[in-house]
Amino acid sequence: MNAMTNVHAGMRCSWRVRLAAMQSPRRRSSPRFLPLLLGLAMLVFALLQVNDPDPLIWVTYYAAIACACTIAAYRPLPRVVFLALAAVTAAGVVLTLPGFIDWLLNRPTSDLWAPMSASRMYIEHSRELLGLLIAGGFLVMGDRLSRK
């Protein structure tokens, strides 16, 4: 009878293990929705850059960020992709920062909404810097959410 009890106890344990494996894990709000939303927003930003003076650069950059956010919705973003896009973002910030500082310190705030002209490149640089900061923030958020 002792052997019978051990077999029965083993079956019960095995049954409990199988039942636990079949049960769905505790539900939580999905962190995957936000990276998809960020990717969609970046795709819209990319499409809005088609009429920019230098569309190839900005459409490509924003589309790459959109792809990274979309990848982050399904699996952790590869480090090399994150670091490459972060490096491009940082380089863009360094290149546009002087124009932004010029606008911030020496120009009226309303100039940011003024039409672009060759004599006022600080407008273009300021807009580009703000776009880079938004895209960089989306990239970091997507990466962090993908690692949860």
Image: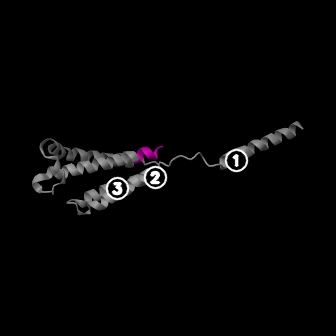
Position in image of residue 91 (x %, y %): 25, 46
Q: Which residue is mark 2?
A: 33
Question: Which percent across, then down, holds residue 81?
Answer: 38, 49
Say whether residue 144 is magenta.
yes
Q: Is residue 79 visible?
A: no
Q: Earlier in the sequence, mark 3 or mark 2?
A: 2
On the image, numbered disc 3 is attached to which residue? 42
In the picture of the structure, the residue carrying the numbered disc 1 is: 19
Residue drawn at the location 22% of the way across and 44% of the way down:
94
Q: CA distance from mark 3 to mark 2?
A: 14 Å
What stretch of residues is rendered in magenta? Answer: 142-148
Identify the element where label 3 is drawn. helix
| x 36%, y 48%: residue | 139
In this rendering, the answer to whether 7 lies above or below 135 is above
The residue carrying pointer 2 sits among few (fewer than 14), some (14 to 19) or many (20 or more) residues within 10 Å by Cα, namely some
Q: Residue at x 56, y 47 (%)?
A: 27
**Secondary structure found at label 2:** helix
